[in-house]
Image (spheres, rainbow, N blue to C red):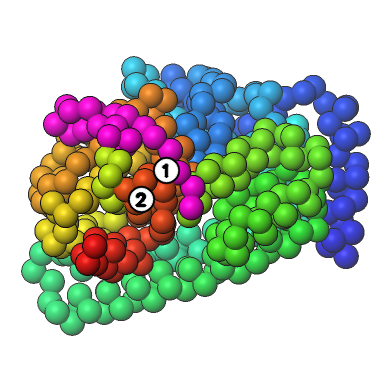
């Protein structure tokens, strides 16, 4: 019955859209918003540089209305206080997908901005309501789990309490992950059942399981989407992403780039031809990245000077000073770059199609990518290759 409902909805969608002015209306009812606050809508996926597309000023406390011609695209919405620099990297954002043209409603609190509840348009479909319910449940568990783990750092807390908080916090995070997996299965079904739904491209964009099966299978799934969807803004982004993944596949020549390093010296990847290079994409804000750092330090101490160079590229950094501090504190003595300094902010990350960190690319002396993946899955291979008898 649900499948009939969603198909009937999208069969009627062109007529609905034709009857409307061609814009999306986003209405916010958000506790904590004050008159004069600025609301900005950014478009582009999380693997792109967000583009400020439309904005509005809050005229009534707690409420705003923003109209945009953006359609069939992922978007992020952020708010800024009067006089605050409109820098998306410095604030929390709430993500949503704009399917066709409709009215979207956002509800919540500014203190919980990234968890705003979305309704209307695409989100009024039965499947999306089920997904939203799972998302809200998972996020609530996630917040509780993080809060409990935070309590473990309470000064003077007894060991039994710390253990109890830690055990419960980790259990909640684990349960949250299981619920997110349930949501993922529902999303995949929506995509499979609705090739003319632009949102299907967003689901496919982050289908890591399918990616692991190879880009041929991934591209096959993209080609199963309708021509309209393939050509819509979100579809074009996905097509570009597929092209990028092919360009940085194992066996491909690593894309060249140039950028000043942490000491102000220009670094060009092609200058390292003749050496093995490990590119490490990471972030000071990324827990798994920070956990990998000691292992990278150990590797570098073993193989530096042996026809090898390591280059770390920080991504999505909010503070240049904090990045420099962590590099120093964590004794990351190899070449360090901050992708926020590259033209268009994040250019190298986009060029390599990096969707999540930590992520590494191992490049041979001819400039060819010979391995890629999580650093902990590559370090042994890197050491073996570098230390092997020549």
Q: In this view, does 22 lie above or below 332?
A: above
Q: Earlier in the sequence, mark 2 or mark 1?
A: 1
Judge the density around disc 2: few (<14), some (14-19), many (≥20) Cα neighbours within 10 Å: many
| The stretch drawn in magenta includes residue 266 | yes
Question: Mark 2 sits on what residue?
Answer: 363
Would you say residue 51 sits in the magenta stretch? no
Q: Where is residue 332 in the image (x, y as percent from the top left)?
A: 15, 49
Q: Residue at x 69, y 39 (%)?
A: 235
Contact between marks 2 and 1 (CB within 8 A): the answer is yes
Badge 1 crowding class, 10 Å Cα cut-off, few under 14, some 14 to 19, many 20 or more, is many
For residue 127, what is the image quadrant?
bottom right
Instruction: Report, in whole angstroms, how far the alpha carbon at label 2 lies from the one at label 1.
Output: 7 Å
Q: Can residue 234 be seen in this view?
A: no
The range drawn in magenta is 251-271
Of the pair 210 and 161, the residue shown nearer to us: 210
For image coordinates 72% across by 55% down, the residue present is 221
Assign a secondary structure to mark 1: loop
| Residue drawn at x 34%, y 41% as measured from the top left | 315
Q: Where's residue 253, x and y in %?
A: 45, 44
The percent coordinates of residue 268 (x first, y second) are 29, 32
Give residue 254's mark: 1
In the displayed structure, would residue 8 be above or below residue 61?
below
């Amino acid at each position: 019955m649900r499948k009939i409902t969603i198909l009937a909805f999208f069969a009627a969608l062109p007529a609905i859209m034709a009857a409307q002015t061609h814009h999306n209306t986003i209405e916010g009812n958000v506790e904590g918003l004050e008159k004069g606050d600025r609301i900005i809508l950014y478009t582009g996926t999380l693997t792109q540089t967000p583009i400020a597309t439309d904005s509005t000023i809050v005229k009534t406390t707690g409420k705003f209305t923003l109209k945009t011609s953006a359609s069939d695209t992922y978007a992020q919405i952020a708010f800024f206080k009067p006089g605050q620099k409109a820098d998306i990297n410095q604030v929390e954002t709430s993500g949503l997908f704009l399917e066709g043209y409709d009215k979207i409603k956002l509800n919540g609190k500014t203190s919980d901005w990234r968890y705003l509840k979305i309704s209307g348009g695409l989100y009024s479909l039965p499947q999306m309501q089920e997904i939203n319910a799972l998302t809200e449940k998972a996020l609530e568990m996630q917040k509780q789990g993080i809060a409990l783990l935070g309590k473990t750092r309470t000064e003077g807390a007894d060991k039994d309490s710390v253990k109890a908080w830690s055990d419960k916090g980790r259990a909640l995070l684990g349960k949250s992950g299981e619920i997110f997996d349930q949501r993922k299965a529902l999303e995949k079904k929506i995509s499979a059942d609705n090739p003319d739904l632009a949102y299907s491209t967003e689901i496919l964009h982050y289908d890591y399981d399918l990616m692991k099966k190879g880009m041929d299978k991934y591209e096959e799934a993209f080609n199963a989407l309708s021509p309209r969807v393939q050509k819509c803004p979100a579809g074009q982004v996905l097509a570009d992403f597929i092209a990028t993944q092919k360009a940085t596949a194992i066996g491909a020549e690593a894309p060249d780039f140039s950028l000043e390093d942490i000491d102000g010296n220009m670094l060009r990847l092609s200058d390292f031809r003749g050496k093995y290079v490990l590119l490490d994409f990471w972030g000071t804000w990324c827990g798994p990245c920070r956990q990998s750092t000691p292992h990278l330090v150990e590797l570098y101490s073993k193989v530096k000077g042996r026809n090898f160079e390591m280059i770390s590229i920080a991504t999505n950094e909010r503070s240049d000073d904090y990045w420099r501090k962590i590099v120093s504190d964590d004794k990351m003595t190899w070449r360090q770059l901050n992708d926020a300094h590259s033209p268009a902010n994040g250019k190298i990350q986009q060029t390599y199609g990096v969707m999540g960190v930590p992520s590494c690319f191992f490049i041979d002396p001819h400039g060819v990518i010979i391995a890629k993946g999580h650093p902990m899955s590559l370090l042994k291979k890197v050491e073996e290759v570098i230390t092997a008898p020549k």
